[in-house]
Image (cartoon, helix red, strand yellow):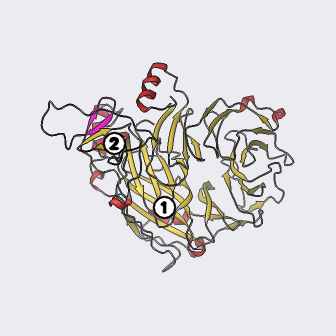
């Protein structure tokens, strides 16, 4: 399969006639395709030749070199049209935030100094879900250029053209710009030396594909007995489990031929009948797969550690009164998991008790779309709802007597102007999390940031709106953002999928 070009993203600077006024680093907005800023590439039809293909496609870096200088607080000024007169007055520095109106002659352009790395991948069919795969000798390496692996599932216009894609993204080099934000000069020089050769090379996308019956609502990957496995929630109401180890070998070993049996799922969970679903999570301690459907049912499918055989549970966990939207295993308790539902509740379950949840909390005044369990501070749970509210919960205050009780979160943010579509804690920084919304924003938050009244007053006055002090970074440029994930091993690398394609980036702030 082939993915062709990536396009430059536009962000972080508003143009006023001949002058360019810098904006807050990292506030991005997609360019207008009608102006020629987006050159869409397409995947080839996977079914014209074989179900699995190994064609190599070029991926063009979306962050090209820019003619920028630093302006005080790390924001960049484009001096292309400032002329040679050094005595000319520097343009006024302004802050742009999503929701602010732009004049007819204003546009947003990417501020490359806000990113260590930024790449934008356009695909033929959008993907609602993806997951990183820890694979290869460099799985833990953060040396540039990066190589990483992922699985994703398509939402094709035709039922029979969907696929599970296994992706290898390599030669992901750093964004080329004059400033490196918080890096000191020695560190910058060393990293630039490491990436000298990669700077002039285009990133590469290689892919394998397995034909998938129906669109993929969600995909999650795990490792079981030293083999990479992926599960897909299909719009048909079935959950398919795939052994993708041979596909990954084909992407890394020249001449390796993927066996025919790898094109088919190794097991299909049919516990949900014909009820479609989205919620899914693998247990990292015992390999159990949680799945929840739109009929309020939750099932667990176990895998035998000795034989590898799957054992589906036919009796559901009962308690929710509406669609189960998300599921998360506890990072510390083997038999405990959390669920989020359109019934506006978050529930904590013990696998040994199916008749009712251990704890039920009325968490939001709208559908609870997503949850994320903090792996570094296991008492913290984040949730996002249909009304754009992002909440942080301290579960040490939860008790079994809280059934249906409205609890108060330890933190709550109403920044997004549309439903929260994804939320995830940073894999190593316990106070940092990322969220995405249907308002085409990805926001990074640090709960450890303390409120500075004077600083925030100045910031809010410049922005002409109230900005939470915990809001670190805003990334834009994609349309209809569906899901985000931190790379579990490459610190600070974040990937997102949207109706307009994929972004993979690392900011200078995290």
Residue density around tag 1, few if under 14, some if 14–19, many if 20 or more, within 10 Å: many
Residue density around tag 2, few if under 14, some if 14–19, many if 20 or more, within 10 Å: many
Outermost residue, left side: 84
Contact? badges 1 and 2 (CB < 8 Å): no
User: Which residue is the site of mark 1?
Assistant: 167
Outermost residue, bottom side: 49
SS label for mark 2: strand
Q: CA distance from mark 1 to mark 2?
A: 33 Å
Judge whether 65 appears above or below 239 on screen.
above
Camera sees residue 353: yes
Residue at 66% across / 52% down in the picture?
282
Q: Position of residue 237 (x, y in %)?
A: 71, 65
User: Which residue is the site of mark 2?
Assistant: 13
Q: Position of residue 243 (x, y in %)?
A: 61, 64
| Residue 94 figure quarter | top left
Decide whether residue 282 is among the magenta residues.
Answer: no
Q: Quadrant of the N terminus?
A: bottom left
Does label 1 or label 2 sit earlier along the sequence? 2
Judge whether 93 appears above or below 258 on screen.
above
Magenta residues?
A: 68-86
């Amino acid at each position: 399969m082939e993915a062709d070009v990536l396009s430059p993203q536009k962000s972080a600077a508003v143009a006023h006639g001949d002058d360019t006024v810098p904006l807050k680093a990292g506030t991005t907005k997609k360019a207008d395709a009608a102006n020629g800023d987006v050159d869409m590439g397409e995947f080839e039809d996977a079914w014209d030749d074989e179900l699995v293909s190994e064609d190599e496609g070029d991926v063009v870096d979306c962050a090209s070199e820019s003619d920028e200088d630093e302006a005080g607080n790390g924001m960049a000024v484009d001096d292309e049209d400032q002329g040679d007169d050094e005595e000319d007055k520097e343009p006024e520095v302004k802050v742009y935030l999503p929701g602010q109106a732009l004049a007819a002659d204003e546009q947003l352009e990417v501020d490359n100094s806000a990113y260590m790395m930024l790449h934008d991948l356009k695909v033929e069919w959008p993907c609602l879900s993806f997951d990183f795969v820890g694979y290869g000798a460099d799985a833990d390496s953060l040396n540039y250029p990066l190589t990483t692996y992922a699985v994703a599932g398509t939402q094709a216009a035709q039922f029979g053209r969907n696929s599970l894609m296994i992706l290898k993204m390599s030669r992901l080099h750093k964004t080329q710009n004059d400033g490196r934000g918080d890096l000191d000069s020695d560190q910058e020089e060393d990293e630039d030396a490491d990436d000298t050769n990669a700077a002039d090379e285009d990133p590469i996308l290689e892919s394998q594909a397995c034909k998938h019956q129906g669109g993929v609502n969600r995909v999650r990957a795990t490792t079981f007995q030293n083999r990479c496995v992926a599960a897909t929630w299909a719009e048909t109401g079935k959950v398919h489990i795939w052994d993708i180890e041979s596909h990954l070998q084909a992407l890394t070993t020249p001449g390796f031929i993927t066996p025919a049996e790898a094109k088919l799922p190794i097991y299909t969970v049919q516990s949900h009948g014909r009820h479609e679903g989205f919620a899914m999570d693998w247990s990292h301690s015992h390999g159990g797969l949680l799945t929840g459907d739109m009929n309020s049912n939750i099932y667990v499918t176990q895998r035998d550690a000795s034989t590898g055989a799957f054992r589906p549970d036919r009796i559901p966990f009962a308690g929710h009164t509406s669609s189960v939207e998300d599921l998360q295993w506890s990072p510390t308790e083997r038999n405990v998991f959390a669920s989020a539902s359109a019934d506006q509740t978050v529930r904590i379950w013990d696998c040994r008790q199916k008749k009712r949840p251990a704890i039920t909390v009325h968490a939001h005044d709208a559908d609870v779309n997503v949850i994320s369990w903090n792996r570094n501070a296991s008492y913290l749970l984040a949730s996002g709802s249909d009304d754009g509210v992002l909440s942080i919960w301290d579960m040490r205050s939860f008790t079994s007597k809280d059934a249906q009780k409205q609890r108060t979160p330890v933190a709550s943010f109403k920044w997004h102007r549309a439903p929260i579509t994804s939320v995830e804690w940073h894999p190593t920084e316990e106070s940092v999390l990322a969220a995405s919304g249907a308002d085409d924003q990805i926001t990074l938050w640090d709960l450890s940031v303390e409120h500075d009244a004077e600083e925030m007053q100045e910031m809010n006055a410049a922005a002409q709106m109230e900005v939470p002090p915990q809001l670190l970074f805003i990334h834009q440029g994609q349309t209809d953002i569906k899901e985000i994930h931190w790379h579990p091993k490459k610190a600070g690398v974040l990937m997102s999928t949207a109706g307009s394609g994929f972004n993979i980036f690392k900011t200078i702030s995290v």
